[in-house]
Image (cartoon, rainbow, N blue to C red):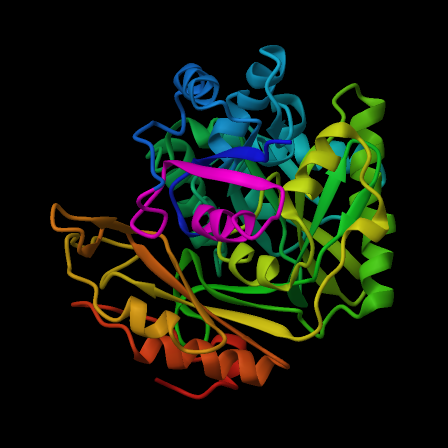
Amino acid sequence: MNGERVLIVGGGGREHALAWRLRQSKSVEAVWVAPGNGGTWPDNVAADAMDVEGLLVLAKARGATLTVVGPEAPLGAGIVDRFTDAGMRCFGPVAAAARLETSKAFAKAFMARHGIATARYEVFKDPEAARDFVCRAPWPVVIKASGLAAGKGVLLPQSTQEAVEAIDELMVARRFGSAADEVVVEERLEGEEVSLLALCDGKVAVALVPARDHKRALDGDLGPNTGGMGAFAPTPALDAQAIEAVRKTVLQPVVDGMAAEGSPYIGVLYAGLMLTADGPKVLEFNCRFGDPETQVVLPLLEGDLAALFGACIDGTLKPDDVVCKPGAAATVVMASGGYPGAYTKGKVIQGIDKANAIEGVQVFEAGTRRDAQGTRVTSGGRVLAVTGIGNNLQQALTKAYQGVGAISFEGAMWRRDIGGGLGGQS
């Protein structure tokens, strides 16, 4: 029997991690990444991740038996719906289910309908009404663009004046365009943040290892929010009993609720949680693997990943199918100087092969490409995610920072306190 021929849609560090892990699956014969990056070369295919029709033509031409969608935007655009209608197997939620991520307003209303704990909130389409509310809000506020804003549409004002300015930035200056056609103003929760991802087959949600990411650009959780400067898994904040409690009160109710509303949830469900004094509450849902969480969750997942994705699509996933390894993983993101603001591209990267040669280190490339000579150069803000794997978190962090120390490119910046800095500095 021929093996799976897998097309991965996307071009970041998450997609490199998916390709790396799927190549380890005994059932997989070939992997292509569209458009991919310097780390997935030479298996890249020139394509636009938002060109659903073009990707469908590509999948058919390559004889793909499984398409795995990395980013959220194609999911929101209905890539799974289109592939499924064409008789192609595609891993991810349909557009109606992906609204949990593509519309924060929808997600909040969905949680209210299904009794899933989250922060108090109000939704606004009119900036004047939003300004009026933040001036009299009964709780400290977080202001969010409802639509997709590349992980950057969440503002944390420290005063009423800053809250009003945030409303103007989103709804008047249109910093994130149509993503802020609706704005969610919600209560700022206090506690520890964790991320819990689950594989879902439309009927059951099976949790993976819990992770924690670091969003701020600078050490000490200072500086602007980014797409993520590092992560580690598992986080001790959720033990096995707490994981099961979140699965029962958050993840499974999402799957049940989506099925009841006619849009069975198939794919990865990512719950961003705040562990408050009143119990876990949902900050947000993502409808795909997170980045950089994927780079620490997948190294700790055993078994045939392609088979797990197939079981989700077929509605045959069983809890015993998902087995997580003991130990820990940590990843440190190396970014271009100036990120998440302006930065320059085309810087030569040295030392990736040297880092990968260190036992327990795997470098996942994100904002990289190969030049005409095959040399890796920078092509994005988050350039690399250097992952270490060990028996415990301290070992994993030490490995990750050893890997970072082997790599160089002009202007490279990274945080030296991922995981609390247990791995030391590089």
Residue found farthest to the left: 373
Query: With 67 as the anchor, is 339 left or right in this view?
Result: left
Q: Residue 366: x percent and y percent?
A: 36, 52
Query: With 4 as the anchor, is 360 left or right in this view?
Result: left
Query: With 173 as the anchor, is 399 left or right in this view?
Result: right
Q: Residue 52: x percent and y percent?
A: 45, 19
Give the quarter of the figure containing the C terminus: bottom left
Q: Is residue 41 magenta?
A: yes
Q: Residue 190: x percent and y percent?
A: 66, 65
Give the quarter of the figure containing the N terminus: top right
In front here: 213 or 303?
303
Question: What residue is shown at x 30% (from left), y 74% (from top)?
Answer: 354
96 vs 169: above or below = above
Residue found farthest to the top: 86
Q: Residue 262: x percent and y percent?
A: 79, 19
333 vs 81: above or below = below
- Is residue 420 among the parts visible in the rendering? yes
- Is residue 125 among the parts visible in the rendering? no
Question: What residue is shown at x 35% (from left), y 73% (from top)?
Answer: 355
In front here: 360 or 291?
360
Query: With 314 as the anchor, is 411 left or right in this view?
Result: left
162 vs 52: above or below = below
Corner quadrant of residue 90:
top right
Question: What residue is shown at x 41% (from left), y 79% (from top)?
Answer: 401
Q: Magenta segment range? A: 14-42
In front here: 222 or 302?
302
Q: Is residue 30 magenta?
A: yes
How many callouts does the rendering have? Answer: 0
